[in-house]
Amino acid sequence: MGINPRKLIAAGATALLVGASTILIAAPASAADNYVDDSQLTAPETNPYPAGWFQGNVATPGGAYVSGLSGLEVTGAIQVLNGIEGTWPAGTGLDPSAPGFADPGITLASGAASFQIPVFTTPSTGPGAPGYTTLYADAAGIASDTWYTSWAIGGGAGAGGYDAGDSAPLADLVAVMDPDYQVLAFGFNVVDGDSATVISLEWAGDTYWFLPAAPTATVSPTSLTVSEFATSGVTATFTGFVPNEDVDISFASSSSGGLIATVPADASGVVTVAVPSTLTVAAGETYTVAAEGLTSLVYTSTTFTVTADAAALPATGADTAGPLALGGTLLVAGLAFVLAMQLRRKRAAA
């Protein structure tokens, strides 16, 4: 999940706490960002599962969903899945201690929803048959590594496995499955009577955003001198956040940085912040201003450069005595030469 740096400095601080251990500008790690809207979620469930996004079958159909500024707004029973059957290597993806762990995650703006992972635990003929289950956990369950199984696995509790509805750490559930278990899909579920606004899902390092658009970041001016920064600072504008969420604003050079403010996004998910001119900057440095939503975990950043003030022009007329004296001497010598030549001509003519 994204990095949430905590407050180091309040807005308007007169100094920036810097040091090698306080660099907070690095973006949250993510292999790819994918933006998904409600028009991509209409395919029905089939056997085998369709590739890509589809609507999973639910016990009480009739739920509704629509894309909004804060994410996918879901009311009632809905299961949204992304089919990867046949593309995900057998026996991989669900053991947190093993390389290639899929790192599942769900982020909500509100409500209740669970991350879903349908799995063939043994060779099977299709969803619902022996050897099939869905492993699921909400955001708190993922954080505490508390997962549930929808069907008995490993022969059930009496055989050392787990019964339907049992919970355990994900690695323990995986341990009772066949070594060649097959992950079929990933997604989320909202049960009948509940609602949720889903911001994003994470799977295998990728993030699937249900927000309207990728975030943007701009700063003005993009280049200024040390004195100009000390006079006016810069103004940064960020878009793509959940409306009204708190957003951390960080400021850093290539070697140090820190948090300078936490401000709310407006009703359109936009944040505009004046970077305090009281912060210390140095000529020749490039500075990053970054924003991360505390609810959405959306991250974006922009940069500006600081140049040296113009050098003072050299003083004029500062030392003229020497040149004037030399000029006067040459002028006198020249006149004496002319006079001497005239006297020689007169004497020669006499």
Image (cartoon, grey):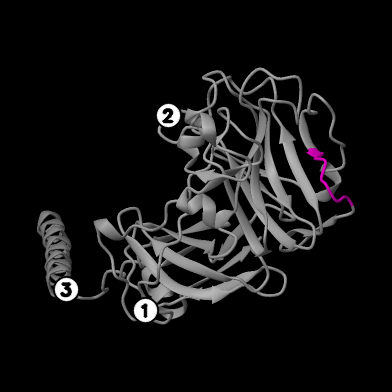
Label drawn at residue 278 = 1
Query: Does 98 sit left or right of 78 as displayed?
Result: left
Label drawn at residue 98 = 2
Label drawn at residue 319 = 3
Query: Does 14 sit left or right of 61 as displayed?
Result: left
Query: Does 271 sit left or right of 161 as displayed?
Result: right
Q: At numbered mark 1, what does the secondary structure look like: helix, strand or loop? A: loop
> Hey, which quadrant is residue 193 in on the image?
bottom right
10 Å neighbourhood of mark 1: few (<14), some, or many (≥20)? some
Based on the picture, tell me whether residue 191 belongs to the magenta stretch.
no
Q: Amino acid at mark 3?
A: Asp
What residue lies at 58% left-to-right and 20% top-to-bottom? 89
Q: At numbered mark 2, what does the secondary structure look like: helix, strand or loop? A: loop
In this view, the residue in front, 232 or 312, is 232
Residue 280: percent from left, percent from top: 32, 71
What residue lies at 82% left-to-right and 58% top-to-bottom? 76
What residue lies at 65% left-to-right and 64% top-to-bottom? 109
Residue 125: percent from left, percent from top: 75, 19
Q: Are marks 3 and 1 in contact (CB under 8 Å)?
A: no
What is the span of residues highlighted in magenta in the rendered image? Answer: 54-61
Q: Amino acid at mark 1?
A: Thr
Q: Earlier in the sequence, mark 3 or mark 1?
A: 1
Q: Height in image: 221 above or below 67?
A: below
In this view, the residue in front, 327 or 173, is 173
In this view, the residue in front, 111 or 278, is 111
